């Protein structure tokens, strides 16, 4: 990793000096200004999510002069956007500098004037389909929706969405977020709808709501936000979550209890998350430095260590910049090859259907 880190640093410095960027600053100027600011405020970054603990520690080790202020690690994407909205005139510690949100939230935040443009040095490696052409938001990583199962409490591991409605899973199934605010949970509803043959978008959102309504009526759905602790305690023996979260939780549990990760047979859905800098960031240079860090070779590989496919994955593999042990640690490729990548329009239509209809159709207050 040391060689990669050095290579990334030289590459970033050179690209910043020679490529067209939204910012005219050099990396050295950004770094100097960020150190003067002395702080970076993040939001909604649980340390087990995508190895964000390692990513944050790496940034702090590289830039010890910059304090990382971590807000509300368990917040959802909607909460992140609202935090920018609510702190437009606040330069204090409650105003986030950067956000990491579901794909559909990037264009929304841009449309509201909540983001500022900035193109990282490795911009060209980020696929065009998951970035704003002007640099207001850009994809950082993706995964697929999965189930994580506490095998001490669940005798028959479910293999598909339809299994979750069976009586044997009474009081056992939960989501890893509130479907009225969390992109992870909103997208889980979409995946459930796809498993029923509905077209991606509003139709799948409504079909997914009906699926969760059936689970709730049957007593299978548990309105608790799932995480490693609730899985271990037995409060949420079956949790629906992104594969990288599920795999990280499995590692955290370390066999106590034993956990199995399942990519469902149908409704295999890929989810892309995106980064953006607040238009009102109290520490804009620290935010730019953070972006350069997470999109560097080392930053991308740290996400991959947390089982997340980083945005630059294909380009980095082609260039021989990904350690083989990180590739070998990923789940089998089959689930990823079958995954459906929804368009922004489909995600927006699904989000509107889910957030607008959850209370009326499902009626479970997830918290």
Image (cartoon, rainbow, N blue to C red):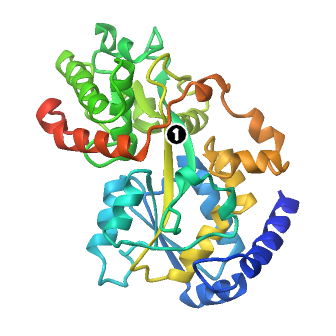
**Image height check: is 188 above or below 217?**
below
Whether residue 259 is visible, yes or no, is yes
**Residue in view at x 23 percent, y 39 percent:** 353
* Count of numbered circles in the view: 1
Q: What quarter of the picture does the N terminus occupy?
A: bottom right
Element type at mark 1:
helix
Residue 222 lies in what quarter of the image?
Answer: top left
Image coordinates for residue 262, horizontal then vertical, percent: 53, 22
Residue 118 lies in what quarter of the image?
Answer: bottom right
Image coordinates for residue 93, horizontal then vertical, percent: 39, 78
Image coordinates for residue 69, horizontal then vertical, percent: 48, 72
**Residue in view at x 59 percent, y 91 percent:** 36
Check disc 1 and report the residue beneath it.
245
Q: Please, which residue is most extreme toward the left here? A: 360
Mark 1 nearby-residue class (10 Å; few <14, some 14–19, many ≥20): many
Whether residue 75 is visible, yes or no, is no
Image coordinates for residue 231, horizontal then vertical, percent: 43, 31
**Residue in view at x 35 percent, y 27 percent:** 199
Looking at the image, residue 359 sits to the left or right of residue 228; the answer is left
**Residue in view at x 28 percent, y 20 percent:** 171
Looking at the image, residue 341 sits to the left or right of residue 235; the answer is right
Q: What quarter of the picture does the C terminus occupy?
A: top left
Q: Nearer the viewer, residue 34 or 248?
A: 34
């Amino acid at each position: 990793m040391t060689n990669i880190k050095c290579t990334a640093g030289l590459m970033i410095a050179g690209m910043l000096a020679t490529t067209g960027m939204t910012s005219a600053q050099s990396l050295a100027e950004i770094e100097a200004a960020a150190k003067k600011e002395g702080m970076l405020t993040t939001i909604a970054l649980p340390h087990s999510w995508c190895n964000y603990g390692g990513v944050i520690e790496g940034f702090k080790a590289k830039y010890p002069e910059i304090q990382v202020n971590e807000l509300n690690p368990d917040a959802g994407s909607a909460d992140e956007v609202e935090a920018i909205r609510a702190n437009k005139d606040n330069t204090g510690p409650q105003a986030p500098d950067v956000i990491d949100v579901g794909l559909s939230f990037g264009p929304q935040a841009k449309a509201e004037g909540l983001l500022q443009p900035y193109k990282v040095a490795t911009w060209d490696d980020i696929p065009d389909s998951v970035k704003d052409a002007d640099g207001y938001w850009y994809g950082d990583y993706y995964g697929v929706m999965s189930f994580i199962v506490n095998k001490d409490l669940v005798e028959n591991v479910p293999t598909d969405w339809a299994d979750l409605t069976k009586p044997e899973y009474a009081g056992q199934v939960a989501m890893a977020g509130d479907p009225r605010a969390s992109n992870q949970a909103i997208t889980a509803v979409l995946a459930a709808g796809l498993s029923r043959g509905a077209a991606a978008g509003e139709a799948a959102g409504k079909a997914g709501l009906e699926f969760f309504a059936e689970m709730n009526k049957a007593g299978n759905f548990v309105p608790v936000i799932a995480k490693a602790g609730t899985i271990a305690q037995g409060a949420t023996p079956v949790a629906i979550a992104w594969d990288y979260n599920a795999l990280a939780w499995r590692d955290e549990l370390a066999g106590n209890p034993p956990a199995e990760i399942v990519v469902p047979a149908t409704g295999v859905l890929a989810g892309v998350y995106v980064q953006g800098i607040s238009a009102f960031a109290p520490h804009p240079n620290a935010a730019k430095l953070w972006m350069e860090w997470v999109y560097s070779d080392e930053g991308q590989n740290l996400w991959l260590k947390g089982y997340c496919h980083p945005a630059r994955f294909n380009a980095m593999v082609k260039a021989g910049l990904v350690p083989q042990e990180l590739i070998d640690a990923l789940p089998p490729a089959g689930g990823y090859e079958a995954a459906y990548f929804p368009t922004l329009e489909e995600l927006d239509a699904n989000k509107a259907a889910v957030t607008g209809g959850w209370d009326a159709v499902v009626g479970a207050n997830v918290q």
